[in-house]
């Protein structure tokens, strides 16, 4: 059976859903977008990386483009219910970056200056102030902490469901259990999406396939540098000393991060030695390493029970930054990929700029540095605050 649509979005994760939401909201009304279809291979939307992540939302980056993406996204999270009609648990408990060397202090001082110049009110906390905010931490080796109180933790399930409900109301068609197997090109422009069920003729295709983005790009003959890389999370059993104000803590020296996850603590760490691949199984050595690194900062964790652990895939690029823009040399194909661990927090801004690209207007946030051809040009983004 053959169908038609104006825009096909490949991937029903938070990025594809947000793109559909802003396209339908910002340009459907003017009838410019037309019929939008989301294609998702899983039985439900939001089951990929979106359903496996830690929920962290932060504006504390070291590059202007990421800070601006975060500011626009945090505003959207703060007004999520008003915008989408669905509630969002967004606990603005802040992100706290712990520094224990002079090199780290100098780096985070510079970042804070940039953040403040863009309207992010990053505070410097002394070890005593850190201890007040997060009483169980070991602070004897710490020099300082950087803290921004509009950062925090959002519920990924709320976000995916909120966008899903909104796009259904907006008239977007969501095809689950449907796998994209090919793209058809006419005169080097996408003209159809082939799935295991139908061929859908269309004018534009948005690649929002997360860790599978390179496979979709390859269907159009484009070599997109996005690789799937496993990241693991561990959640403890109940801990009575983690209060509601406990922030997202990032220990800059060890790379461990952790935040309150009722009734205990969610912990993670990005193992730089993990090789690309689609394996998401939990690995006991990886779990142990996360626990050891967290224990260094939170010695009381020693007595905690381990609740659960899981693996998920980062969609990683060579400079660990997103790729957003029209596919070079291929008409009608737009990439919104490679968020490398920041895709949840940047989903609203990503959706907004893709809506602009689709409607042919200048994106409301400058995308020059996210361009797909920056790798060929050797113009990588210099972001030092990657987790
Ligand atoms: C352990 C872990 C912790 C993380 N922590 C954070 C965090 O704290 N904060 C943050 O901002 N980000 C975090 N991330 C990253 C974040 O989860 C991702 O950047 C984000 O979910 C990407 O969304 P997406 O929609 O692009 O990808 P996905 O959610 O993976 O969605 C892509 C969808 O495309 C579908 N698909 C793929 N191929 C096809 C095909 N051929 N046909 C049809 N459908 C297809 C997939 O099934 C999938 O549902 C974390 C990720 C992991 C793994």
Image (tube, helix red, strand yellow):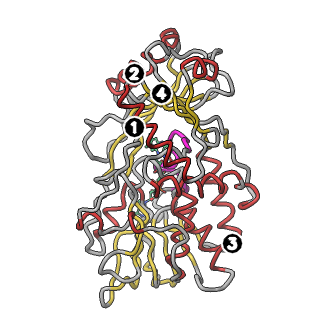
Q: Report the disc number at residue 98.
A: 4
Question: How far from the left and from the top, in percent, is residue 233?
Answer: 45, 32
Residue at 63 percent across and 74 percent down: it is 24
Question: How far from the left and from the top, in percent, is residue 277?
Answer: 28, 47
Is there a contact, CB below 8 Å, between mark 4 and mark 2? no
Question: How far from the left and from the top, in percent, is residue 337?
Answer: 41, 61
Q: CA distance from mark 3 to mark 1?
A: 45 Å
Q: Which residue is mark 3?
A: 170
Left or right: 287, with 298 as reference point: left
Question: How far from the left and from the top, in percent, is residue 300?
Answer: 52, 10
Residue 258 vertical placement versus 338 (above, below): above
Q: Nearer the viewer, residue 29 or 246?
A: 246
First of labels 4, 3 by sequence position: 4
Q: CA distance from mark 4 to mark 2?
A: 13 Å
Q: Nearer the viewer, residue 94 or 156?
A: 94
* Mark 3 crowdedness (10 Å alpha carbons): few <14, some 14-19, many ≥20: some
Q: Which residue is mark 1?
A: 107
Q: Nearer the viewer, residue 133 or 209?
A: 133
The stretch of residues the image draws in magenta is 43-57
* Mark 2 crowdedness (10 Å alpha carbons): few <14, some 14-19, many ≥20: some
Whether 268 is among the magenta residues is no
- Camera-nearest label, 4 or 3: 4
Q: Which residue is mark 2?
A: 293
Q: Secondary structure at mark 1?
A: helix
**Quadrant where the C terminus lies?**
top left
- Camera-nearest label, 3 or 1: 1
């Amino acid at each position: 059976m053959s169908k038609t649509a104006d825009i096909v979005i490949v991937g029903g994760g938070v990025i594809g859903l947000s793109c559909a939401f802003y396209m339908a909201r910002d340009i459907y009304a003017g009838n410019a977008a037309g019929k939008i279809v989301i294609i998702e291979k899983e039985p439900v939307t939001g089951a990929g990386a979106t359903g496996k992540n830690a929920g962290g939302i932060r504006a504390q980056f070291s590059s202007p483009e990421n800070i601006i993406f975060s500011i626009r996204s945090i505003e959207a999270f703060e007004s999520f219910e008003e915008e989408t009609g669905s509630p969002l648990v967004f606990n603005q408990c802040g992100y706290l970056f712990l520094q224990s060397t002079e090199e780290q202090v100098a780096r985070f001082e510079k970042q804070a200056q940039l953040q403040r110049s863009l309207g992010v009110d990053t505070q410097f906390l002394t070890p005593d102030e850190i201890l007040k905010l997060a009483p169980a931490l070991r602070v004897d080796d710490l020099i300082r902490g950087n803290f921004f109180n509009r950062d925090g933790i959002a519920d990924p399930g709320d976000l995916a469901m909120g966008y899903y409900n909104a796009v259904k109301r907006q008239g977007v068609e969501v095809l689950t259990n449907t796998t994209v197997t090919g793209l058809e090109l006419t005169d080097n422009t996408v003209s159809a999406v082939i799935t295991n069920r139908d061929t859908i003729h269309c004018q534009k295709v948005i690649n929002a396939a997360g860790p599978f983005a390179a496979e979709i790009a390859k269907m159009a003959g484009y070599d997109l540098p996005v690789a799937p890389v496993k990241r693991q999370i561990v959640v403890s059993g109940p801990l009575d000393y983690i209060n509601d104000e406990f922030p997202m803590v990032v220990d800059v020296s060890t790379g461990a991060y952790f935040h309150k996850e009722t009734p205990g603590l969610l912990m993670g760490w990005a193992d730089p030695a993990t090789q690309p691949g689609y394996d998401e199984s939990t690995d006991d050595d990886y779990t142990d390493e996360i626990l050891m690194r967290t224990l260094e900062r939170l010695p009381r964790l020693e007595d905690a029970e381990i609740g659960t652990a899981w693996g998920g895939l980062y969609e990683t690029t060579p400079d660990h930054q997103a790729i957003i823009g029209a596919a070079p040399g291929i008409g009608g194909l737009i990439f919104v990929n490679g968020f490398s661990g920041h895709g949840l927090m940047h989903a609203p801004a990503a959706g907004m700029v893709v809506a602009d690209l689709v409607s042919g207007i200048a994106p409301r946030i400058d995308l020059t540095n996210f361009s797909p051809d920056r790798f060929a040009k050797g113009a990588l983004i210099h972001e030092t605050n990657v987790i």
